[in-house]
Image (cartoon, helix red, strand yellow):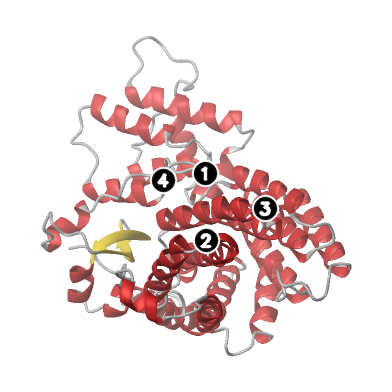
């Protein structure tokens, strides 16, 4: 039997020390190996072998374990030290990108985002060091689909031109701004149109336009004074929040954190507590989706405290809290939070500007997502199937999200042929919209279907998915 990693001798090797650190993080969180394995998408037997230094640890596994244990990059840094000390060749360039993409040092709230992600996997594809026109795209790396920054010209050369559309535009010229006249209603209407269009085609094609309008709006606001400046700042805050949502949905978590943080700061300046509550909820959502569910609980609680009592904003905050509990494996707490959300919705204001889309069907769909996270795939599949049946056709991107989640739930429930068929439908919408939420769920589906690759439809799904992601040379 191998030596326990927390019983180290003075001459213990670097991987024994790393295994000890892994075990200490796991036990400090009160998590069983099985729970950690499920969160990190790693076989349970590997966790024990990693802790006992009985099995080589790929960097990709260290990154996923760091996220699963909320280690804030400590496990990744420890892995790097062990790798150097062990005298191996060092981390492969692909692994460096994977660690950066997973954001091991990025906190879910208010922290400084990581440095720009490394591009070394794509140097073999002929990249020059002067490339600065980057887009974040899905790429197949070490068998997984990750979102990485890539020079636009490489994406265009790959034949996946649709993924190259999110460029940072130049700000409007001063003379263009001068000709615009009163901008408030103009920019308000533009924002409404972009929200409606996002439902149809996704954010990848819209973010450049939104960034252009945001730059123009900011220029007008800086030139204004008094009430006009405050009103323009309030609208600019909504643009920043929407830009954060678009950035998150194309997989650019770094930009999403930046836009959302700016929106939160501006909401305090304007004194709009309802908007502050909404953005705190968005930060909770961003935290849980980027691997920091514990942070999301605090942000959701702050959103609820800030939200007006009896408002739909309060319901939204509780929904974020519920899913964070689910991600943390706290099923009973998640259930209580969803029950509380239903109660709150029953007495919430019917004419609220915030959360006008919120209804029981939305809560049921959110609950289905949490059920899948908790491993209750059969109930989750029923919830997603119902959501898809009731979704209006104009919500094209959301249909793709629901299809991908339904497919993963059906795969978890053992209905692999059905899962593959639904997955192919979701692949088509992922290609149309560029939504990272669809891609990330399809990646999980791909992993779930890998052991049954010979079953009907699975090869078709996996081939379709491979056609819409970048493949480093």
Is residue 153 found left or right of 416 in the rendered image? left
Q: Which mark is residue 452?
A: none
Label 1, label 3: how far apart the Cα atoms are: 23 Å
Please name which of the two marks, 4 or 3, marks the residue nearer to the observer.
Answer: 4
Asked if the residue at tag 1 contacts the one at tag 4, i.e. Cβ–Cβ closer than 8 Å, the answer is no
Q: Dot 4 lies on which element? A: loop
Label 2, label 4: how far apart the Cα atoms are: 32 Å
x and y percent of residue 2 in the render?
44, 24
x and y percent of residue 77 in the render?
36, 32
Q: Write down the residue under mark 4.
A: 113
Q: Which mark is residue 110?
A: 1
Q: Dot 1 lies on which element? A: loop
Asked if the residue at tag 4 contacts the one at tag 2, i.e. Cβ–Cβ closer than 8 Å, the answer is no
Please name which of the two marks, 2 or 4, marks the residue nearer to the observer.
Answer: 2
x and y percent of residue 297 in the render?
67, 46
Q: Dot 3 lies on which element? A: helix
**Label whose residue precedes the other's in the sequence (1 or 2):** 1
Label 4, label 1: how far apart the Cα atoms are: 9 Å
Viewer-side residue, 99 vs 21: 99
Q: Which mark is residue 225?
A: 2
Measured along the vertical axis of the image, is residue 276 above or below residue 470?
above
Q: Write down the residue under mark 3.
A: 326
Asked if the residue at tag 3 contacts the one at tag 1, i.e. Cβ–Cβ closer than 8 Å, the answer is no
Q: Dot 2 lies on which element? A: loop
Viewer-side residue, 369 vs 349: 349
Label 1, label 2: how far apart the Cα atoms are: 29 Å
**Label whose residue precedes the other's in the sequence (2 or 4):** 4
């Amino acid at each position: 039997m191998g030596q326990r990693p927390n019983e180290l001798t003075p001459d213990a090797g670097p991987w024994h020390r790393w295994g000890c650190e892994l075990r200490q993080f796991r036990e400090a969180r009160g998590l069983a190996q099985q729970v950690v394995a499920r969160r990190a998408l790693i076989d349970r037997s590997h966790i024990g072998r990693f802790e006992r230094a009985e099995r080589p640890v790929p960097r990709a596994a260290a990154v996923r374990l760091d996220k699963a244990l909320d280690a804030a990059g400590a496990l990744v840094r420890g892995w790097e030290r062990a790798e150097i000390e062990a005298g191996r060749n060092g981390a492969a360039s692909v692994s460096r990108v994977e660690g950066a993409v997973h954001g091991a040092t990025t906190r879910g709230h208010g922290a400084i985002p990581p440095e720009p992600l490394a591009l070394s996997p794509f140097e073999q594809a002929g990249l020059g060091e002067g490339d600065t026109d980057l887009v974040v795209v899905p790429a197949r790396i070490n068998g997984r689909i990750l979102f990485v920054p890539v020079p636009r010209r490489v994406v265009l050369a790959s034949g996946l031109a649709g993924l190259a559309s999110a460029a940072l535009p130049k700000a409007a010229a001063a003379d263009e701004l001068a000709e615009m006249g009163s901008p408030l209603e103009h920019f308000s209407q533009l924002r409404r149109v972009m929200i409606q269009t996002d439902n149809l085609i996704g954010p990848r094609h819209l973010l450049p336009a939104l960034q252009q309008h945001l730059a123009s709006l900011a220029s007008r606001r800086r030139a204004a004074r008094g009430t006009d400046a405050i009103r323009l700042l309030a609208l600019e805050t909504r643009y920043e929040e929407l830009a954060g949502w678009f950035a998150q949905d194309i997989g650019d978590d770094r930009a999403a954190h930046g836009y959302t943080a700016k929106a939160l700061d501006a909401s305090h300046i304007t004194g709009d507590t309802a908007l502050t509550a909404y953005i705190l909820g968005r930060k909770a959502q961003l935290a849980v989706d980027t691997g920091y569910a514990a942070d999301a609980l605090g942000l959701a609680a702050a959103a609820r405290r800030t939200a007006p009592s009896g408002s739909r904003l309060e319901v939204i905050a509780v929904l974020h809290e519920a899913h964070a509990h689910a991600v943390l494996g706290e099923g009973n707490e998640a259930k209580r939070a969803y029950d509380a959300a239903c109660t709150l919705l029953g007495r919430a204001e019917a004419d609220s500007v915030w959360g006008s889309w919120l209804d029981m069907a939305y809560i049921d769909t959110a609950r289905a997502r949490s059920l899948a996270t908790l491993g209750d795939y059969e109930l989750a599949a029923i919830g997603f199937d119902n959501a898809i049946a009731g979704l209006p056709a104009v919500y094209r991107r959301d249909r793709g999200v629901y299809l991908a989640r339904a497919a993963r739930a059906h795969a978890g429930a053992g209905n692999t042929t059905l899962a593959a068929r639904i997955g192919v439908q979701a692949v088509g919408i992922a290609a149309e919209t560029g939504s990272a939420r669809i891609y990330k769920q399809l990646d999980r589906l791909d992993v779930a279907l890998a052991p049954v690759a010979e079953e009907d439809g699975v090869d078709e799904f996996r081939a379709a998915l491979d056609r819409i992601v970048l493949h480093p040379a």
